[in-house]
Image: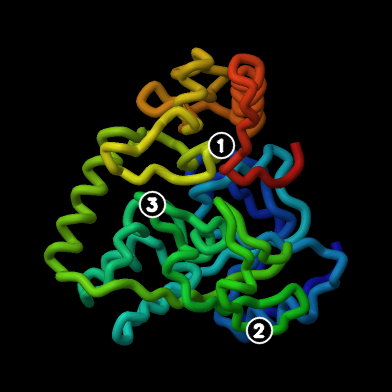
Amino acid sequence: MTDLPAVRGTLTSGRPLADLTWLRVGGPADWLFQPADLDDLSSFLRDLDPRIEVFPMGVGSNLIVRDGGIRGVVVRLGRGFNEISVDGDRVTAGAGALGAHVARRAAEAGVDLTFLRTIPGSVGGAVRMNAGCYGTYVADALCEVQAVARDGAVLTLTPGDLDFAYRSTSLPEGWVLTRATFSGPAGDPAGLAARMDDQLARRDATQPTKDRTAGSTFRNPAGYSSTGRDDDTHDLKAWKLIEDAGLRGHRLGGAQMSEKHPNFLINTGTATAADLESLGELVRARVRETTGRQLTWEVIRVGEG
């Protein structure tokens, strides 16, 4: 690979990525860059050969890294990007901060961002995927984000710039989100804390939170998240289509569709990335054959097989 720019953070060649993902699979990155701060990230991307691909990686909660690893540079934000501050009804968080921490900090200040509490992963990933839960999405609460473009330019983007849709944004490849500002309605801190406790209890009762998963494997064909209400419909939920195809608990190698929630793909302990992706593709094919519906991956799959 071409010589890379000098950095003040950490730049590691051939870094295995499996231990940085929730599914614990995948090969190495050519390079893993953990920038010291915004200026370090900006200057690195500015001076990096534009032919080299850049992949921003959060905490790996929604990710399958294929067994051949990732060519190019993986950027992973660390402690310099996880601060959280509250000013009135506005909550600003570094892209490396966990959504759960943001929700708790906001609740302590009387700001309702409780929907973030049960969404796994970092703020950057939540924004990029327009994560949502209980009928509320990042798009509903986001004021602005800071991002570093592939050429190193530091930009402030509005929700309109991101073109939010279900589980997606239009953020260009190689751009790195570094900070996000949200706003939420006022709420009583004790009441918000109680609501989050209830949400966690419901999540733990219905999802395999003790297993190695990457969250929901497929998007809901209906195009919306569960609302948590009693009148929520399940007919076009991914889990129901997988259930109807007879694939709850189905195994392939070390991979399994959860018995507890069939839209969760599990590493039972011996899975390769190929096992997980192959099982996912088997599920997609079986659901297409039995229901005529096309499931779309929600888990991001990157790298070489």
Which is nearer the eye, 284 or 16? 284
The three-letter code of the residue at mark 1 reads Pro
Quarter of the image with the N terminus in it: bottom right
Residue 56 percent across, percent down from the top left: 63, 62
Q: CA distance from mark 1 to mark 3?
A: 15 Å
Residue under label 2, please give it: 154
| Residue occupying the point 69% across, 46% down | 302
Residue 127 percent across, percent down from the top left: 52, 63
With respect to residue 61, does 219 lie above or below?
above
Residue under label 1, please give it: 221
Classify 10 Å Cα crowding around label 2: few (below 14), some (14-19), many (20 and above): some
Q: CA distance from mark 2 to mark 3?
A: 32 Å
Which quadrant holds residue 279?
Answer: top right
With respect to residue 35, does 195 lie above or below?
above
The three-letter code of the residue at mark 3 reads Gly
| Residue occupying the point 39% across, 34% down | 233
Which is nearer the eye, 226 or 246? 226
Q: Earlier in the sequence, mark 2 or mark 1?
A: 2
Which quadrant holds residue 305?
Answer: top right
Q: CA distance from mark 2 to mark 1?
A: 35 Å
The three-letter code of the residue at mark 2 reads Val
| Residue occupying the point 55% across, 56% down | 129
Q: From this viewpoint, which residue is outermost toward the left?
A: 190
Can residue 171 be seen in this snapshot? Answer: yes
Residue 46 percent across, percent down from the top left: 77, 81
With respect to residue 247, does 84 lie above or below?
below
Q: Earlier in the sequence, mark 2 or mark 3?
A: 3
Residue 66 percent across, percent down from the top left: 68, 40
Residues at marks 2 and 3 touching, judged by CB atoms closer than 8 Å: no
Q: Where residue 135 is drawn, which disc sits there?
A: 3
With respect to residue 206, does 194 lie above or below?
below
Q: Where residue 148 is drawn, which disc sits there?
A: none
